[in-house]
């Protein structure tokens, strides 16, 4: 067969192979076999340029050499390498005798492998160089013009095919990211995180807000310390809202809520098939938070193994997906929170000291509610308005005794408790006048005391409260001294609630003169 015909037919075979849907390894094998018909080789490889690291990675390699020094995934820097030269100059480079011309970084590895000649071709798409095609042989010697032209044509076909694959991967990644963002937002909506306003004018709280405002515009890592329910998450969100990243994502991870087996894939993502059940490639929360803020709540609960991986991300800004070979660069501002004594955890060996120092750059300690009693009034009004909005109850107001009760109650550390008491009071008060019955306060303490083993649901709480009041009134519902009046409910509303709760007047108590449940 004539040389020109052979080259043409081979090129056609290469194009056909590129159009067939195969995985990259078998595809490369078919193409490399075609190239061999025209130019004998002992090593054929493709590198791709990675701008993040300004280097080239071997994307596919086939070699006859016994001990290949540069294998699949090996990385070569652009500076000083032949592939870098080809990339920068957009043209082919041949070392006809590697022994004599070891001018580039990778040449000594090729000589070690036993190669005599190396040809590097740019993979060009619209004058953009994606990487290189590299053909090496044990033989030394010249390459004629036709062969150069043939190789360049093969390189162009490969370049366009790779460009399509990369574009497809990018679309997949973007759609994966969008899907994850949607899932995340749906979760967030479900959790109805509408209590974002930061409320408080006490001097201890103002100090916290001043620190927050000072650090917000920087990219410094912030560690929020404080008892549970003191507002660490509210402040993390406020920090993000005040930062230059406010229009970028704010992503939250509760380290205590995720089982240890899941936390790494949740944080760092995973490749398809990385473990049983990983049917799709999944971006982690670090990737979702790219250019924004990642809030790691309850960081003290993070398993030691995950702490080591988190430390690596903080050091290099690169995330390794589980089962992945290529790290992904992320630009994330980290905010962490804990109610645990991290220094004690470091002493006990359950928290890494090096991670602690990475996080403890700008600690902010939140005061418990007992140390900011001046804020109770404002917080109570704030929660009343929010809960009123949530339950669609307009113009709610505390009756004067109730506000006094809230102000004098010996609140422990927790703002969430105050909020919950108010929510219960609103539900139990039938009118726009909200009564915080004294009963609500001790019950809340009992619920949260360590000796109480079972959590009490809102339904149970309502039932206990109603029974208590009915017992006080000897099951009298109507009139000034009746349970309906004390509960601030219409008697008919109370009667229907009793029916709903399945409560009946005990037979030992004589009936009221009106219709009874
Ligand atoms: N200063 C504040 N202003 C307004 N709301 C607040 C404030 N502090 C706390 N809250 C409310 O109290 C509840 C508990 O706050 P948050 O979840 O931020 O606490 P946390 O310290 O992160 O709790 P945990 O340790 O349990 O994760 C939330 O509903 C929040 O809206």
Image (cartoon, rainbow, N blue to C red):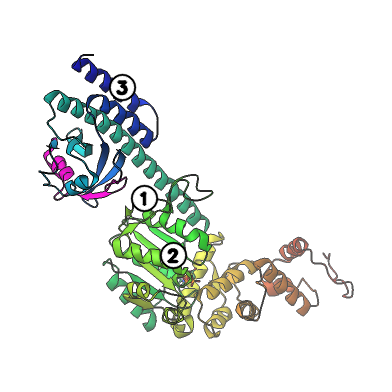
- Residue 110, picture quadrant: top left
Mark whose residue sits in front, 2 or 3: 3
Q: What is the distance, in whole Å, between disc 2 and disc 3 at their CAs?
A: 49 Å
Q: On screen, 122 above or below 108?
A: above
Examine the rendering and report whether any part of residue 26 can be seen. yes
Mark whose residue sits in front, 2 or 1: 1
Category of crowding for the residue at label 3, using alpha-carbon neighbours closer than 10 angstroms: few (below 14), some (14–19), many (at least 20)? some
What is the magenta range? 67-92
Sequence-first disc among 2 and 1: 2
Sequence-first disc among 2 and 3: 3
Q: Residue 516: image x %, image y %?
A: 83, 66
Q: Label 3: which residue?
A: 13
Q: Label 2: which residue?
A: 306
Q: Label 1: which residue?
A: 325
Q: Residue 274: image x %, image y %?
A: 46, 50
Q: On screen, 470 above or below 492?
A: below
Q: Give the SS element for disc 2.
A: helix
Q: Nearer the viewer, residue 287 or 232?
A: 287
Sequence-first disc among 3 and 1: 3
Q: What is the distance, in whole Å, between disc 3 and disc 1 at their CAs?
A: 31 Å
Q: What is the distance, in whole Å, between disc 2 and disc 1 at their CAs?
A: 18 Å
Q: Residue 21: image x %, image y %?
A: 40, 29
- Residue 31, picture quadrant: top left
Category of crowding for the residue at label 1, using alpha-carbon neighbours closer than 10 angstroms: few (below 14), some (14–19), many (at least 20)? few
Contact (Cβ within 8 Å) of mark 3 with mark 1 = no
Ligand 1: does it lie within 8 Å of the C-beta at label 2? no
Circle count: 3
């Amino acid at each position: 067969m004539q040389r020109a015909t052979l080259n043409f037919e081979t090129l056609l075979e290469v194009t056909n192979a590129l159009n067939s849907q195969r995985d990259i390894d078998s595809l490369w094998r078919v193409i490399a076999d075609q190239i061999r018909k025209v130019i004998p080789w002992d090593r054929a490889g493709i590198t791709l340029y990675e701008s993040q690291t300004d280097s080239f990675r071997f994307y596919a390699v086939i070699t006859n050499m016994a001990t290949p020094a540069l294998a699949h995934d090996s990385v070569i820097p652009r500076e000083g390498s032949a592939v870098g030269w080809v990339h920068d100059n957009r043209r082919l480079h041949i070392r006809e005798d590697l022994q004599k011309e070891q001018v580039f970084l990778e040449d000594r590895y090729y000589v070690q492998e036993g190669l005599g000649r190396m040809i590097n071709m740019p993979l060009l798409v619209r004058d953009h160089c994606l990487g290189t095609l590299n053909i090496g042989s044990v033989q030394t010697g010249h390459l004629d013009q036709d062969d150069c032209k043939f190789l360049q044509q093969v390189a162009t076909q490969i370049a366009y095919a790779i460009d399509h694959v990369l574009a497809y991967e990018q679309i997949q990644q973007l759609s994966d990211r969008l899907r994850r963002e949607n899932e995340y937002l749906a979760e967030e909506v479900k959790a109805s995180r509408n209590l974002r306003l930061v409320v408080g004018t006490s001097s201890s709280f103002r100090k916290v807000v001043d620190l927050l405002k000072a650090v917000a515009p920087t990219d410094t890592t912030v560690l929020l310390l404080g008892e549970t329910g003191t507002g660490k998450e509210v402040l993390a969100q406020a920090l993000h809202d005040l930062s230059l990243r406010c229009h970028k994502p704010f992503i939250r991870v509760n380290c205590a809520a995720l089982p240890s087996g899941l936390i790494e894939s949740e944080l760092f993502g995973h490749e398809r098939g990385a473990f049983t059940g990983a049917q799709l490639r999944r971006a982690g929360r670090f990737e979702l938070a790219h250019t924004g803020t990642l809030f790691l709540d309850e960081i003290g609960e993070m398993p030691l193994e995950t702490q080591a991986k988190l430390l690596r991300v903080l050091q290099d800004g690169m995330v390794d997906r589980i089962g992945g070979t290529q790290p992904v660069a992320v630009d994330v501002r980290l905010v962490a929170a804990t109610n645990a004594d991290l220094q004690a955890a470091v002493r006990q060996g359950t928290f890494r000291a090096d991670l602690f120092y990475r996080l403890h750059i700008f600690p902010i300690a939140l005061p418990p509610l007992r140390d900011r009693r001046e804020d109770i009034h404002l917080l109570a009004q704030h929660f009343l308005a929010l809960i009123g909005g949530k339950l669609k109850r307009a113009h709610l107001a505390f009756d004067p005794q109730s506000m006094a009760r809230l102000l004098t109650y010996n609140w422990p550390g927790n703002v969430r408790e105050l909020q919950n008491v108010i929510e219960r009071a609103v539900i139990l008060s039938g009118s726009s006048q909200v009564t915080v019955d004294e009963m609500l306060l001790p019950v809340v303490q009992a619920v949260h005391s360590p000796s109480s083993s079972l959590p009490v649901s809102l339904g149970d709480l309502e039932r206990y409260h109603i029974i208590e009041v009915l017992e006080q009134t000897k099951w009298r519902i109507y009139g000034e001294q009746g349970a309906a009046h004390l509960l601030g409910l219409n008697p008919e509303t109370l009667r229907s609630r009793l029916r709903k709760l399945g409560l009946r007047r005990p037979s030992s108590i004589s009936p009221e003169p009106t219709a009874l449940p």
